[in-house]
Image: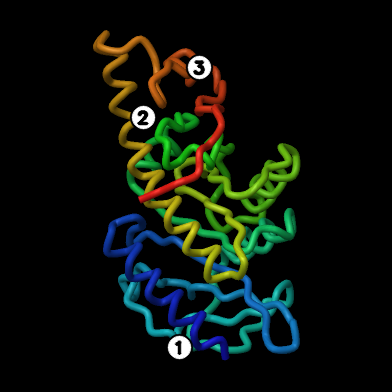
Amino acid sequence: MFEREREEMAKLVKLIFDRKNTNVAGGNFSFKALDENGKEYIIMTPTMMSEAYLGNLTPSQILVVEPHTRKIVAGEGKLTREINMHEAVYDTNKEIRAVLHAHAPESMFWATSGLDMPNLTEATQKVGYVPVLPFAPNCSEELAEIVSDYIVAHHLSVPHELLLDSHGVLINTSGADGVEAIHKALAILDTMEWNAKIAQQQAVFQSLGLLDGFYSKGRKIGSIEDIKNHRPIYNQEPIFSGGD
């Protein structure tokens, strides 16, 4: 069942783990898929994917889950307790087709510090403001509620990234289908890690007096004081299409 989709998820898990964009402490990824009758399922990584398997999963270990009943209709593993956060996110916006939670190290610096991440690079501009949410224990209903309430209260469009205090990053994306959406989430995870490091370095340069603020696309868009006061720092100029 969903053979191609489960193969893609297994490849993605290995790539994220090999690139050290999550660690053995966890992380969990999911995307939506429709069967031939139009019924919706969640394709999701099993619990212990990092600690027990070090990211080396076979397609058969990727789960096919019935939404809300949480019934596993295919797959050899057990369901992660973080399914509650994934379901809560999907329920906020029908456009969200993939949810990626990881313990990416550079982004974890900002999340654990309780600081919003300045979004400075051209490649990450579409992600917009990257806030840190209040702390709640991992896998808790409280955390799922904090995340979903924030998305609804701020009318977040996709894609977006949220920092989970002391726990990691959460990236939610849209796409023509779930596979496209989870690949978009992977691209954001990777480019946001570069951005997180650059933002750290610009913060250090400010403390050394080498910069007078955070710079993006050739202009100053914020300062250390903005970080302290949780004022959004991201470049709001028009986004130009293109690529390499």
Q: Which residue is mark 1?
A: 60
Residue 19 against residue 207 in the figure, above or below: below
Residue at mark 3: 226
Circle 2 — which element? helix
* Mark before the other along the chain sequence, 1 or 2: 1
Q: Nearer the viewer, residue 212 or 44?
A: 212
Q: CA distance from mark 1 to mark 3?
A: 47 Å
Q: Is residue 41 left or right of residue 225?
A: right
Q: Tell me where residue 35 sits by quadrant.
A: bottom right
With respect to residue 214, does 66 lie above or below? below
Sequence order check, earlier mark of 1 and 3:
1
Residue drawn at x 45%, y 41% as measured from the top left: 124
- Pointer 2 residue: 199
Q: Residues within 10 Å of mark 3 (few under 14, many from 20)?
A: some
Q: How packed is label 1: few (under 14 Cα within 10 Å), some, or many (20 or more)? A: some
Real-space CA distance between mark 2 and mark 3, rounded to the nearest whole angstrom? 13 Å
Q: Give the residue displayed 25% in from the left and 11% down from the top.
A: 210
Residue at left offset 69%, top offset 89%: 36
Q: In the structure shown, which secondary structural element does the residue marked by tag 3 occupy?
A: helix
Q: Are marks 1 and 3 in contact (CB under 8 Å)?
A: no
- Amino acid type, mark 3: Asp
Q: In the displayed structure, would residue 149 be above or below residue 208?
A: below
